[in-house]
Amino acid sequence: MGTSSSWSFSRRILGMTHLKLTGAPLLPDLETQLFDSYVYDLKWDGSRANHHDIFHVSNLPTADFAKYLISSVKFHCGQLLYLFDEDRFMQKLENFYRDPAKEARASPLWFCHYLFILAFGKIFVLQSSKKEGPAGVEHFLQAMQCMPDLNFFDAEAIEKIQVLCCGALYLHSIHHRLPAYQMIGNALRVALWKGMYTEMHSSCLDEEYVQRCNLAWWTVYILERRMTSLVGLPMGISEESISVRYPSIVTRDETSNVMDMQVKLCQILAKVDLTVYGPEGKVDSRYLSATQSVLRDIAKVTERLNTSFDLYTNGSMSGTSRISAHLHILEHQCIILTTRPLLYIFLQSKLGQSDPALLKWLQSETVKALLHICVESAQQILRILSSLLEQGILETFLPFDMDAASTSTISLLVAAAIDPSLLKDHSPWSQRAHKIFDQMILRGNHSAKLVQMELKQLDDELAQLAMKGVMENVLPRDNYSQFVEYVPPVAASGHNSLELDFDESFGQHYELSPDQMMELANSLDLNSLSWPLSSIHDSSGLAI
Protein backbone atom coordinates (compact mmCIF):
# COMPACT_ATOMS: atom_id res chain seq x y z
CA MET A 1 0.00 0.00 0.00
CA GLY A 2 1.12 3.54 -0.76
CA THR A 3 2.63 5.88 1.79
CA SER A 4 -0.50 8.01 2.14
CA SER A 5 -2.38 4.93 3.35
CA SER A 6 -3.39 5.05 7.01
CA TRP A 7 -3.11 1.27 7.24
CA SER A 8 0.37 1.38 5.74
CA PHE A 9 1.37 4.17 8.13
CA SER A 10 0.33 2.23 11.22
CA ARG A 11 2.07 -0.95 10.04
CA ARG A 12 5.31 0.90 9.30
CA ILE A 13 5.22 2.66 12.67
CA LEU A 14 4.65 -0.62 14.49
CA GLY A 15 7.23 -2.44 12.38
CA MET A 16 9.85 0.21 13.05
CA THR A 17 9.17 0.20 16.80
CA HIS A 18 9.11 -3.61 17.00
CA LEU A 19 12.42 -3.88 15.15
CA LYS A 20 14.09 -1.43 17.54
CA LEU A 21 12.73 -3.19 20.63
CA THR A 22 13.35 -6.81 19.63
CA GLY A 23 15.93 -6.63 16.88
CA ALA A 24 13.62 -8.70 14.69
CA PRO A 25 10.85 -7.80 12.23
CA LEU A 26 7.19 -8.42 12.97
CA LEU A 27 6.15 -12.05 12.67
CA PRO A 28 4.33 -12.93 9.46
CA ASP A 29 1.02 -13.58 11.21
CA LEU A 30 1.09 -10.09 12.71
CA GLU A 31 1.89 -8.61 9.31
CA THR A 32 -1.09 -10.29 7.65
CA GLN A 33 -3.79 -10.30 10.32
CA LEU A 34 -5.29 -7.01 9.14
CA PHE A 35 -5.56 -7.97 5.50
CA ASP A 36 -8.73 -9.09 3.76
CA SER A 37 -9.75 -12.71 4.41
CA TYR A 38 -7.82 -12.78 7.68
CA VAL A 39 -10.56 -10.63 9.23
CA TYR A 40 -13.80 -12.13 7.89
CA ASP A 41 -13.92 -15.54 6.24
CA LEU A 42 -16.97 -15.36 3.98
CA LYS A 43 -16.60 -19.04 3.04
CA TRP A 44 -17.10 -18.20 -0.60
CA ASP A 45 -14.51 -18.32 -3.36
CA GLY A 46 -16.43 -16.20 -5.84
CA SER A 47 -17.82 -19.13 -7.80
CA ARG A 48 -21.50 -19.17 -8.78
CA ALA A 49 -21.54 -22.59 -10.44
CA ASN A 50 -22.37 -24.61 -7.33
CA HIS A 51 -25.27 -22.51 -6.14
CA HIS A 52 -28.36 -24.29 -7.45
CA ASP A 53 -30.87 -21.56 -6.60
CA ILE A 54 -29.27 -18.19 -6.11
CA PHE A 55 -32.66 -16.48 -6.35
CA HIS A 56 -34.21 -18.25 -3.39
CA VAL A 57 -36.39 -16.02 -1.17
CA SER A 58 -36.84 -18.33 1.82
CA ASN A 59 -34.65 -16.27 4.16
CA LEU A 60 -36.08 -12.83 3.36
CA PRO A 61 -37.72 -10.75 6.10
CA THR A 62 -41.39 -9.83 6.07
CA ALA A 63 -42.36 -6.69 4.18
CA ASP A 64 -42.82 -4.70 7.42
CA PHE A 65 -39.44 -5.73 8.81
CA ALA A 66 -37.80 -5.04 5.44
CA LYS A 67 -39.16 -1.48 5.50
CA TYR A 68 -37.75 -1.03 8.99
CA LEU A 69 -34.33 -2.24 7.83
CA ILE A 70 -34.44 0.07 4.83
CA SER A 71 -35.29 3.02 7.10
CA SER A 72 -32.20 2.23 9.20
CA VAL A 73 -30.03 2.39 6.08
CA LYS A 74 -31.61 5.72 5.24
CA PHE A 75 -30.74 7.01 8.73
CA HIS A 76 -27.13 5.82 8.61
CA CYS A 77 -26.33 6.60 4.97
CA GLY A 78 -29.16 8.57 3.39
CA GLN A 79 -27.71 12.05 3.79
CA LEU A 80 -24.14 10.98 3.18
CA LEU A 81 -24.48 8.80 0.08
CA TYR A 82 -27.02 8.20 -2.69
CA LEU A 83 -27.17 4.41 -2.36
CA PHE A 84 -30.80 4.11 -3.43
CA ASP A 85 -33.63 6.32 -4.61
CA GLU A 86 -36.24 5.97 -1.88
CA ASP A 87 -39.39 6.57 -3.94
CA ARG A 88 -38.37 4.30 -6.80
CA PHE A 89 -36.94 1.66 -4.49
CA MET A 90 -40.02 1.45 -2.27
CA GLN A 91 -42.34 1.22 -5.28
CA LYS A 92 -40.35 -1.76 -6.54
CA LEU A 93 -40.44 -3.23 -3.05
CA GLU A 94 -44.24 -3.19 -3.09
CA ASN A 95 -44.24 -5.00 -6.42
CA PHE A 96 -41.62 -7.47 -5.22
CA TYR A 97 -43.58 -8.68 -2.19
CA ARG A 98 -46.61 -9.53 -4.33
CA ASP A 99 -44.61 -12.44 -5.82
CA PRO A 100 -41.02 -12.50 -4.49
CA ALA A 101 -39.85 -15.64 -6.31
CA LYS A 102 -41.03 -14.38 -9.69
CA GLU A 103 -39.80 -10.81 -9.24
CA ALA A 104 -36.34 -11.91 -8.04
CA ARG A 105 -35.72 -13.64 -11.37
CA ALA A 106 -37.45 -10.99 -13.44
CA SER A 107 -35.43 -8.11 -11.91
CA PRO A 108 -32.08 -9.65 -10.88
CA LEU A 109 -30.20 -6.35 -10.52
CA TRP A 110 -32.90 -4.82 -8.32
CA PHE A 111 -33.02 -8.05 -6.28
CA CYS A 112 -29.26 -7.79 -5.81
CA HIS A 113 -29.66 -4.14 -4.78
CA TYR A 114 -32.38 -5.10 -2.30
CA LEU A 115 -30.21 -7.80 -0.73
CA PHE A 116 -27.37 -5.32 -0.24
CA ILE A 117 -29.72 -2.90 1.52
CA LEU A 118 -31.01 -5.73 3.73
CA ALA A 119 -27.43 -6.66 4.63
CA PHE A 120 -26.68 -3.09 5.68
CA GLY A 121 -29.98 -2.79 7.52
CA LYS A 122 -29.44 -5.90 9.62
CA ILE A 123 -25.95 -4.90 10.71
CA PHE A 124 -27.26 -1.45 11.70
CA VAL A 125 -30.19 -2.90 13.67
CA LEU A 126 -29.03 -6.27 15.00
CA GLN A 127 -26.10 -6.97 17.29
CA SER A 128 -23.97 -9.90 16.25
CA SER A 129 -20.73 -11.43 17.49
CA LYS A 130 -20.84 -14.42 15.14
CA LYS A 131 -17.39 -15.55 14.09
CA GLU A 132 -18.43 -16.17 10.50
CA GLY A 133 -19.47 -12.60 9.83
CA PRO A 134 -21.74 -9.68 10.70
CA ALA A 135 -25.52 -9.89 10.94
CA GLY A 136 -27.09 -10.06 7.49
CA VAL A 137 -23.94 -11.32 5.78
CA GLU A 138 -26.05 -14.06 4.16
CA HIS A 139 -27.91 -11.37 2.21
CA PHE A 140 -24.64 -9.82 1.08
CA LEU A 141 -23.31 -13.17 -0.13
CA GLN A 142 -26.53 -13.94 -1.99
CA ALA A 143 -26.37 -10.50 -3.62
CA MET A 144 -22.82 -11.14 -4.81
CA GLN A 145 -23.81 -14.57 -6.14
CA CYS A 146 -26.85 -13.39 -8.08
CA MET A 147 -25.35 -10.16 -9.42
CA PRO A 148 -25.58 -10.13 -13.23
CA ASP A 149 -22.48 -9.59 -15.33
CA LEU A 150 -22.73 -5.82 -15.58
CA ASN A 151 -20.46 -5.77 -18.61
CA PHE A 152 -23.35 -7.18 -20.63
CA PHE A 153 -26.47 -6.78 -18.49
CA ASP A 154 -28.83 -4.13 -19.85
CA ALA A 155 -29.96 -1.84 -17.02
CA GLU A 156 -30.07 1.83 -16.11
CA ALA A 157 -26.57 3.15 -15.42
CA ILE A 158 -27.65 4.82 -12.16
CA GLU A 159 -28.92 1.53 -10.75
CA LYS A 160 -25.72 -0.23 -11.81
CA ILE A 161 -23.70 2.45 -10.02
CA GLN A 162 -25.78 2.22 -6.85
CA VAL A 163 -25.44 -1.56 -6.72
CA LEU A 164 -21.68 -1.33 -7.21
CA CYS A 165 -21.39 1.39 -4.57
CA CYS A 166 -23.37 -0.72 -2.08
CA GLY A 167 -21.17 -3.73 -2.73
CA ALA A 168 -17.96 -1.72 -2.53
CA LEU A 169 -18.95 -0.04 0.73
CA TYR A 170 -19.92 -3.35 2.34
CA LEU A 171 -16.67 -5.01 1.22
CA HIS A 172 -14.72 -2.03 2.51
CA SER A 173 -16.52 -2.30 5.85
CA ILE A 174 -15.54 -5.96 6.28
CA HIS A 175 -11.90 -5.26 5.35
CA HIS A 176 -12.00 -6.88 1.90
CA ARG A 177 -10.17 -3.92 0.49
CA LEU A 178 -8.97 -5.16 -2.88
CA PRO A 179 -12.41 -6.27 -4.12
CA ALA A 180 -13.90 -3.07 -2.64
CA TYR A 181 -11.36 -1.00 -4.58
CA GLN A 182 -12.08 -2.94 -7.76
CA MET A 183 -15.84 -2.59 -7.38
CA ILE A 184 -15.79 1.16 -6.75
CA GLY A 185 -13.47 1.43 -9.76
CA ASN A 186 -16.10 -0.31 -11.87
CA ALA A 187 -18.74 2.12 -10.61
CA LEU A 188 -16.47 5.02 -11.51
CA ARG A 189 -16.03 3.74 -15.05
CA VAL A 190 -19.75 3.31 -15.58
CA ALA A 191 -20.24 6.91 -14.44
CA LEU A 192 -17.46 8.15 -16.70
CA TRP A 193 -18.84 6.28 -19.69
CA LYS A 194 -22.23 7.95 -19.17
CA GLY A 195 -20.63 11.40 -18.90
CA MET A 196 -21.73 11.98 -15.32
CA TYR A 197 -18.53 13.85 -14.53
CA THR A 198 -19.64 16.61 -16.94
CA GLU A 199 -22.45 19.15 -16.60
CA MET A 200 -24.73 17.02 -18.84
CA HIS A 201 -26.44 19.96 -20.56
CA SER A 202 -28.83 18.77 -23.22
CA SER A 203 -32.44 19.31 -24.25
CA CYS A 204 -32.70 15.53 -24.55
CA LEU A 205 -32.00 14.92 -20.86
CA ASP A 206 -34.77 15.03 -18.31
CA GLU A 207 -34.05 17.33 -15.33
CA GLU A 208 -34.85 14.62 -12.80
CA TYR A 209 -32.48 12.24 -14.57
CA VAL A 210 -29.71 14.84 -14.49
CA GLN A 211 -30.27 15.35 -10.75
CA ARG A 212 -30.07 11.61 -10.10
CA CYS A 213 -26.92 11.35 -12.22
CA ASN A 214 -25.40 14.21 -10.24
CA LEU A 215 -26.03 12.47 -6.89
CA ALA A 216 -24.83 9.14 -8.28
CA TRP A 217 -21.62 10.72 -9.59
CA TRP A 218 -20.74 12.46 -6.34
CA THR A 219 -21.47 9.29 -4.35
CA VAL A 220 -18.99 7.40 -6.53
CA TYR A 221 -16.53 10.28 -6.20
CA ILE A 222 -16.72 10.37 -2.39
CA LEU A 223 -16.29 6.61 -1.99
CA GLU A 224 -13.54 6.42 -4.61
CA ARG A 225 -11.56 9.27 -3.08
CA ARG A 226 -11.83 7.87 0.45
CA MET A 227 -10.96 4.31 -0.52
CA THR A 228 -8.10 5.47 -2.75
CA SER A 229 -6.63 7.54 0.08
CA LEU A 230 -6.92 4.69 2.57
CA VAL A 231 -5.02 2.29 0.33
CA GLY A 232 -2.60 4.93 -0.94
CA LEU A 233 -3.23 4.43 -4.66
CA PRO A 234 -3.57 6.96 -7.52
CA MET A 235 -6.94 8.58 -8.07
CA GLY A 236 -9.20 7.15 -10.76
CA ILE A 237 -9.83 10.58 -12.33
CA SER A 238 -8.01 13.89 -11.93
CA GLU A 239 -9.78 16.86 -10.41
CA GLU A 240 -9.13 18.90 -13.55
CA SER A 241 -11.25 16.48 -15.62
CA ILE A 242 -14.38 16.94 -13.49
CA SER A 243 -16.77 19.69 -14.57
CA VAL A 244 -20.06 18.53 -13.04
CA ARG A 245 -21.77 21.00 -10.72
CA TYR A 246 -22.00 20.54 -6.95
CA PRO A 247 -25.12 18.69 -5.73
CA SER A 248 -26.58 21.78 -3.99
CA ILE A 249 -26.61 23.69 -7.29
CA VAL A 250 -28.57 20.91 -8.97
CA THR A 251 -31.00 19.67 -6.30
CA ARG A 252 -31.07 22.37 -3.58
CA ASP A 253 -31.97 20.32 -0.53
CA GLU A 254 -30.34 19.42 2.79
CA THR A 255 -28.96 16.12 1.52
CA SER A 256 -27.18 17.85 -1.33
CA ASN A 257 -25.65 20.37 1.12
CA VAL A 258 -24.21 17.50 3.14
CA MET A 259 -22.85 15.89 0.00
CA ASP A 260 -21.40 19.26 -1.08
CA MET A 261 -19.36 19.44 2.10
CA GLN A 262 -18.18 15.85 1.72
CA VAL A 263 -17.09 16.59 -1.83
CA LYS A 264 -15.10 19.66 -0.76
CA LEU A 265 -13.36 17.70 2.00
CA CYS A 266 -12.63 14.81 -0.38
CA GLN A 267 -11.11 17.30 -2.81
CA ILE A 268 -8.77 18.34 -0.01
CA LEU A 269 -8.08 14.67 0.72
CA ALA A 270 -7.10 14.16 -2.91
CA LYS A 271 -4.87 17.23 -2.81
CA VAL A 272 -3.10 15.90 0.31
CA ASP A 273 -2.41 12.59 -1.41
CA LEU A 274 -1.19 14.27 -4.58
CA THR A 275 0.88 17.16 -3.20
CA VAL A 276 1.86 16.46 0.42
CA TYR A 277 2.92 12.88 -0.26
CA GLY A 278 3.61 13.22 -3.95
CA PRO A 279 3.53 10.63 -6.72
CA GLU A 280 6.57 8.80 -5.33
CA GLY A 281 5.50 9.00 -1.71
CA LYS A 282 8.35 11.28 -0.66
CA VAL A 283 8.34 14.03 1.92
CA ASP A 284 10.62 16.28 -0.05
CA SER A 285 11.39 19.98 -0.36
CA ARG A 286 7.79 20.63 -1.47
CA TYR A 287 6.34 19.45 1.82
CA LEU A 288 5.94 22.79 3.62
CA SER A 289 4.58 24.67 0.61
CA ALA A 290 2.12 21.84 -0.10
CA THR A 291 1.11 21.80 3.56
CA GLN A 292 0.58 25.54 3.57
CA SER A 293 -1.65 25.31 0.52
CA VAL A 294 -3.71 22.46 2.02
CA LEU A 295 -4.20 24.32 5.32
CA ARG A 296 -5.46 27.36 3.44
CA ASP A 297 -7.96 25.18 1.62
CA ILE A 298 -9.08 23.65 4.92
CA ALA A 299 -9.53 27.15 6.36
CA LYS A 300 -11.90 28.04 3.53
CA VAL A 301 -13.95 24.87 4.02
CA THR A 302 -13.94 25.28 7.82
CA GLU A 303 -15.82 28.57 7.57
CA ARG A 304 -18.81 26.93 5.91
CA LEU A 305 -18.48 23.76 7.97
CA ASN A 306 -18.70 25.63 11.27
CA THR A 307 -21.59 27.75 10.03
CA SER A 308 -23.77 25.12 8.36
CA PHE A 309 -22.81 22.00 10.30
CA ASP A 310 -22.16 23.10 13.86
CA LEU A 311 -21.53 20.12 16.12
CA TYR A 312 -23.65 21.62 18.90
CA THR A 313 -26.34 23.61 17.10
CA ASN A 314 -28.80 23.83 19.97
CA GLY A 315 -26.45 23.75 22.92
CA SER A 316 -24.87 20.88 24.78
CA MET A 317 -28.19 19.38 25.89
CA SER A 318 -29.06 18.38 22.32
CA GLY A 319 -25.96 16.28 21.89
CA THR A 320 -23.83 15.98 18.80
CA SER A 321 -25.25 15.83 15.29
CA ARG A 322 -24.31 12.54 13.59
CA ILE A 323 -24.01 14.18 10.16
CA SER A 324 -21.99 17.14 11.48
CA ALA A 325 -19.76 14.74 13.40
CA HIS A 326 -18.98 12.80 10.22
CA LEU A 327 -17.97 15.97 8.40
CA HIS A 328 -15.89 17.44 11.22
CA ILE A 329 -14.08 14.12 11.71
CA LEU A 330 -13.19 14.07 8.01
CA GLU A 331 -11.88 17.63 8.28
CA HIS A 332 -9.59 16.68 11.15
CA GLN A 333 -8.44 13.56 9.34
CA CYS A 334 -7.31 15.79 6.49
CA ILE A 335 -5.25 17.81 8.98
CA ILE A 336 -3.69 14.70 10.50
CA LEU A 337 -2.84 13.21 7.10
CA THR A 338 -1.16 16.49 6.17
CA THR A 339 0.96 16.78 9.31
CA ARG A 340 1.73 13.21 10.39
CA PRO A 341 4.76 12.72 8.05
CA LEU A 342 6.60 14.82 10.63
CA LEU A 343 5.62 12.34 13.35
CA TYR A 344 7.09 9.54 11.27
CA ILE A 345 10.44 11.16 10.56
CA PHE A 346 10.92 12.25 14.19
CA LEU A 347 10.10 8.78 15.54
CA GLN A 348 12.41 7.30 12.95
CA SER A 349 15.16 9.63 14.09
CA LYS A 350 14.56 8.89 17.79
CA LEU A 351 14.81 5.17 17.11
CA GLY A 352 18.18 5.67 15.45
CA GLN A 353 16.96 4.67 12.00
CA SER A 354 17.76 8.05 10.47
CA ASP A 355 20.03 10.99 11.27
CA PRO A 356 19.44 12.13 14.91
CA ALA A 357 20.15 15.68 13.74
CA LEU A 358 16.67 15.71 12.25
CA LEU A 359 15.33 16.23 15.76
CA LYS A 360 16.72 19.75 15.62
CA TRP A 361 13.71 20.55 13.47
CA LEU A 362 11.71 20.43 16.67
CA GLN A 363 13.21 23.83 17.45
CA SER A 364 11.40 25.27 14.44
CA GLU A 365 8.23 27.15 15.34
CA THR A 366 6.79 26.06 12.00
CA VAL A 367 7.30 22.39 12.81
CA LYS A 368 6.08 22.81 16.36
CA ALA A 369 2.89 24.50 15.19
CA LEU A 370 2.18 21.70 12.71
CA LEU A 371 2.73 19.05 15.36
CA HIS A 372 0.44 20.89 17.77
CA ILE A 373 -2.39 21.07 15.26
CA CYS A 374 -1.92 17.38 14.48
CA VAL A 375 -2.33 16.58 18.18
CA GLU A 376 -5.30 18.94 18.54
CA SER A 377 -7.08 17.36 15.58
CA ALA A 378 -6.45 13.86 16.91
CA GLN A 379 -7.87 14.86 20.28
CA GLN A 380 -10.89 16.49 18.68
CA ILE A 381 -11.68 13.33 16.73
CA LEU A 382 -11.70 11.35 19.97
CA ARG A 383 -13.89 14.01 21.64
CA ILE A 384 -16.43 13.73 18.84
CA LEU A 385 -16.37 9.93 18.74
CA SER A 386 -16.74 9.82 22.52
CA SER A 387 -19.80 12.04 22.32
CA LEU A 388 -21.31 9.76 19.68
CA LEU A 389 -20.55 6.75 21.87
CA GLU A 390 -22.32 8.31 24.85
CA GLN A 391 -25.37 9.06 22.70
CA GLY A 392 -25.45 5.53 21.26
CA ILE A 393 -24.93 6.68 17.66
CA LEU A 394 -21.31 5.63 17.16
CA GLU A 395 -20.94 3.97 13.75
CA THR A 396 -19.78 0.43 14.50
CA PHE A 397 -19.93 -1.20 11.05
CA LEU A 398 -19.15 1.36 8.37
CA PRO A 399 -15.38 1.92 8.46
CA PHE A 400 -15.25 5.70 8.83
CA ASP A 401 -15.42 6.03 12.65
CA MET A 402 -13.05 3.11 13.17
CA ASP A 403 -10.48 4.52 10.75
CA ALA A 404 -10.73 7.92 12.43
CA ALA A 405 -10.25 6.40 15.89
CA SER A 406 -7.20 4.48 14.70
CA THR A 407 -5.68 7.45 12.86
CA SER A 408 -6.07 9.77 15.85
CA THR A 409 -4.88 7.29 18.48
CA ILE A 410 -1.68 6.31 16.71
CA SER A 411 -0.90 10.00 16.13
CA LEU A 412 -1.23 10.73 19.85
CA LEU A 413 0.91 7.72 20.80
CA VAL A 414 3.71 8.79 18.50
CA ALA A 415 3.46 12.49 19.42
CA ALA A 416 3.79 11.68 23.13
CA ALA A 417 6.79 9.47 22.36
CA ILE A 418 8.75 11.97 20.31
CA ASP A 419 8.13 15.08 22.44
CA PRO A 420 6.35 15.10 25.84
CA SER A 421 5.68 18.83 25.44
CA LEU A 422 3.20 17.95 22.71
CA LEU A 423 1.20 15.66 24.98
CA LYS A 424 2.14 15.14 28.62
CA ASP A 425 0.03 12.01 29.08
CA HIS A 426 -1.65 10.15 26.26
CA SER A 427 -3.25 7.51 28.51
CA PRO A 428 -6.62 9.30 29.07
CA TRP A 429 -7.01 9.64 25.32
CA SER A 430 -5.95 6.04 24.70
CA GLN A 431 -8.44 4.83 27.30
CA ARG A 432 -11.22 6.74 25.58
CA ALA A 433 -10.16 5.28 22.21
CA HIS A 434 -10.25 1.76 23.61
CA LYS A 435 -13.78 2.33 24.92
CA ILE A 436 -14.74 3.30 21.39
CA PHE A 437 -13.16 0.14 19.99
CA ASP A 438 -14.76 -1.95 22.74
CA GLN A 439 -18.21 -0.79 21.60
CA MET A 440 -17.41 -1.65 17.99
CA ILE A 441 -16.17 -5.09 19.04
CA LEU A 442 -19.30 -5.65 21.13
CA ARG A 443 -21.35 -4.96 18.01
CA GLY A 444 -19.46 -7.69 16.15
CA ASN A 445 -16.80 -5.64 14.34
CA HIS A 446 -13.85 -8.04 14.00
CA SER A 447 -11.72 -5.41 12.28
CA ALA A 448 -11.95 -3.15 15.33
CA LYS A 449 -10.62 -5.95 17.55
CA LEU A 450 -7.53 -6.37 15.40
CA VAL A 451 -6.94 -2.63 15.12
CA GLN A 452 -7.21 -2.33 18.90
CA MET A 453 -4.68 -5.16 19.34
CA GLU A 454 -2.28 -3.35 17.03
CA LEU A 455 -2.63 -0.08 18.95
CA LYS A 456 -2.13 -1.80 22.30
CA GLN A 457 0.99 -3.48 20.98
CA LEU A 458 2.37 -0.16 19.76
CA ASP A 459 1.57 1.52 23.08
CA ASP A 460 3.28 -1.28 24.99
CA GLU A 461 6.38 -1.28 22.80
CA LEU A 462 6.78 2.49 22.94
CA ALA A 463 6.50 2.30 26.73
CA GLN A 464 9.19 -0.39 26.87
CA LEU A 465 11.49 1.69 24.70
CA ALA A 466 10.92 4.70 26.97
CA MET A 467 11.82 2.60 30.03
CA LYS A 468 15.03 1.57 28.32
CA GLY A 469 15.85 5.20 27.61
CA VAL A 470 15.60 4.80 23.87
CA MET A 471 12.96 7.52 23.58
CA GLU A 472 14.85 10.13 25.62
CA ASN A 473 15.29 13.43 23.85
CA VAL A 474 18.71 13.71 22.25
CA LEU A 475 18.72 17.49 21.78
CA PRO A 476 20.90 19.68 23.99
CA ARG A 477 18.97 20.73 27.06
CA ASP A 478 19.50 24.44 26.55
CA ASN A 479 18.04 24.30 23.06
CA TYR A 480 15.19 22.01 24.11
CA SER A 481 13.96 24.40 26.79
CA GLN A 482 13.67 27.17 24.23
CA PHE A 483 10.95 25.45 22.27
CA VAL A 484 9.11 23.44 24.94
CA GLU A 485 7.44 26.65 26.08
CA TYR A 486 6.44 27.66 22.57
CA VAL A 487 2.67 27.87 22.09
CA PRO A 488 1.58 28.11 18.43
CA PRO A 489 -1.23 30.43 17.35
CA VAL A 490 -3.86 27.66 17.28
CA ALA A 491 -3.18 26.42 20.80
CA ALA A 492 -3.07 29.96 22.15
CA SER A 493 -6.62 30.69 21.04
CA GLY A 494 -8.29 30.07 24.38
CA HIS A 495 -8.87 26.36 23.81
CA ASN A 496 -5.50 24.97 24.78
CA SER A 497 -6.71 21.46 25.45
CA LEU A 498 -3.13 20.25 25.73
CA GLU A 499 -2.95 21.76 29.18
CA LEU A 500 -6.21 20.24 30.45
CA ASP A 501 -7.01 16.82 31.83
CA PHE A 502 -9.19 14.59 29.67
CA ASP A 503 -12.54 15.12 31.38
CA GLU A 504 -12.18 18.89 31.34
CA SER A 505 -10.99 19.11 27.75
CA PHE A 506 -13.67 16.70 26.58
CA GLY A 507 -16.33 18.95 28.02
CA GLN A 508 -15.22 21.88 25.90
CA HIS A 509 -16.75 22.50 22.50
CA TYR A 510 -13.34 23.02 20.95
CA GLU A 511 -13.21 23.63 17.24
CA LEU A 512 -10.76 25.45 15.02
CA SER A 513 -11.89 28.71 13.50
CA PRO A 514 -11.13 29.62 9.87
CA ASP A 515 -9.05 32.57 11.07
CA GLN A 516 -6.90 30.34 13.28
CA MET A 517 -6.32 27.90 10.45
CA MET A 518 -5.44 30.65 7.98
CA GLU A 519 -3.15 32.30 10.55
CA LEU A 520 -1.29 29.03 11.00
CA ALA A 521 -0.95 28.52 7.26
CA ASN A 522 0.37 32.05 6.73
CA SER A 523 2.82 31.74 9.64
CA LEU A 524 4.66 28.74 8.17
CA ASP A 525 8.27 29.52 7.34
CA LEU A 526 8.86 27.66 4.09
CA ASN A 527 12.64 28.01 4.46
CA SER A 528 12.83 26.70 8.02
CA LEU A 529 13.80 23.14 7.09
CA SER A 530 17.24 23.06 5.57
CA TRP A 531 17.66 19.28 5.45
CA PRO A 532 17.22 17.75 1.97
CA LEU A 533 13.91 16.05 2.71
CA SER A 534 13.84 14.09 -0.54
CA SER A 535 16.72 11.95 0.73
CA ILE A 536 14.83 10.64 3.76
CA HIS A 537 13.76 7.01 3.52
CA ASP A 538 12.50 4.48 5.99
CA SER A 539 14.43 1.43 7.12
CA SER A 540 13.02 -0.73 4.33
CA GLY A 541 14.20 1.66 1.65
CA LEU A 542 10.75 3.02 0.89
CA ALA A 543 10.15 6.74 0.76
CA ILE A 544 8.18 8.15 3.66
Image: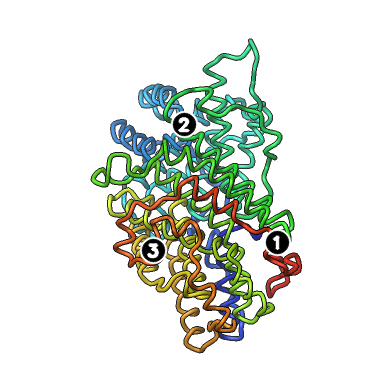
Instruction: Report the amino acid beneath label 1.
Output: Asn
Q: Which of pointers 3 and 2 lies earlier in the amino acid sequence?
A: 2
Does dot 2 land on a helix, a strand or a loop? Answer: helix
Quadrant of the image for the N terminus?
bottom right
Quarter of the image that includes the C terminus: bottom right
Rounded to the nearest angstrom, the CA distance separating label 3 from label 2 is: 30 Å
| Cβ atoms under marks 1 and 3 closer than 8 Å | no
**From the viewer's perspective, is 472 left or right of 117?**
right
Q: Quadrant of residue 315?
A: top left
The disc labelled 2 sits on which kind of residue? Asn
From what the image shows, is residue 85 above or below residue 335?
above
Decide which of 13, 148 is in the foreground and name it.
Answer: 13
Residue labelled with disc 3: 433
Q: Which mark is residue 172?
A: none
Residue 395 seen by the camera: yes
Residue reaching furthest to the left: 317
Amino acid beneath label 3:
Ala
Label 1 belongs to which residue?
527
Q: Are marks 3 and 2 in contact (CB under 8 Å)?
A: no
Q: Is residue 1 visible?
A: no
Q: Gap between marks 2 and 1, in whole Å? A: 39 Å
Query: Few, some or many C-alpha atoms within 10 Å of disc 3 (few <14, some 14-19, many ≥20)?
Result: many
**Tag 2 residue:** 257
Q: Secondary structure at mark 1?
A: loop
Q: Earlier in the sequence, mark 2 or mark 1?
A: 2
> x%, y% of residue 209?
55, 19
Q: Residue furthest top?
A: 203
